[in-house]
Amino acid sequence: MFTLRAAKCEDFARNFEIWCTSVRATHQFLSAEDFDEIGALVEKSYLPTAGFTVAVDADDTAHGFMGATGDHVDALFVHAESRGQGSR
């Protein structure tokens, strides 16, 4: 089962990994150059400054994260290996 909590600084590397695997699994239309360019922006500008909610397992390992404004989900990323796993 996953629980939700606010992202912590320690989640940064895992959230970037989640972003990478999620985008690679769902955005096949991006060229390698586009992926690298967007990835650099996500890593350097987006992830460090936005507040996220992470879905973690019993070991506190993040499997996905989302950004929201009020009740509107702005971004949702799930690790490629965690997709389709439901509420384990």
Image: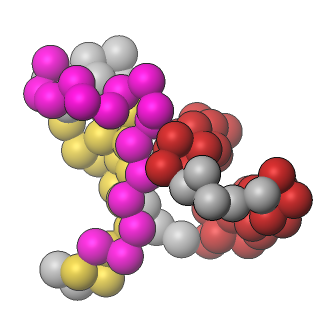
- Membership of 18 in magenta stretch: no
* Residue 17 falls in image quadrant: top right
Which image quadrant: the C terminus?
top left
Image position of 23 with respect to 69: above or below:
above
* Residue 73 falls in image quadrant: bottom left
Residue 41 image offset from top left, x and y in percent: 77, 68
Does residue 46 appear to the left or right of 3 in the view shown? right
Does residue 16 appear to the left or right of 58 in the view shown? right
Q: Residue at x 29, y 47 (%)?
A: 5
Q: Residue at x 63, y 60 (%)?
A: 29
Task: Pick whichever, 18 or 56, lies toward us.
Answer: 18
* First to last magenta residue range: 73-88
Does residue 78 appear to the left or right of 49 in the view shown? left
Image position of 37 with respect to 7: above or below:
below
* Residue 82 falls in image quadrant: top left
- Whether residue 73 is visible, yes or no, is yes
Which image quadrant: the N terminus?
top left
Residue 13 image offset from top left, x and y in percent: 66, 39
Residue 78 image offset from top left, x and y in percent: 39, 43
Image position of 73 with respect to 60: above or below:
below
In this view, the residue farthest toward the front is 29
Residue 86 image offset from top left, x and y in percent: 15, 29
**Colour option used:** secondary structure
- Membership of 84 in magenta stretch: yes
Task: Pick whichever, 81 or 4, lies toward us.
Answer: 81
Image position of 87 with respect to 67: above or below:
above
Q: Residue at x 23, y 81 (%)?
A: 72
Q: Residue at x 32, y 32 (%)?
A: 83
- Whether residue 44 is visible, yes or no, is no
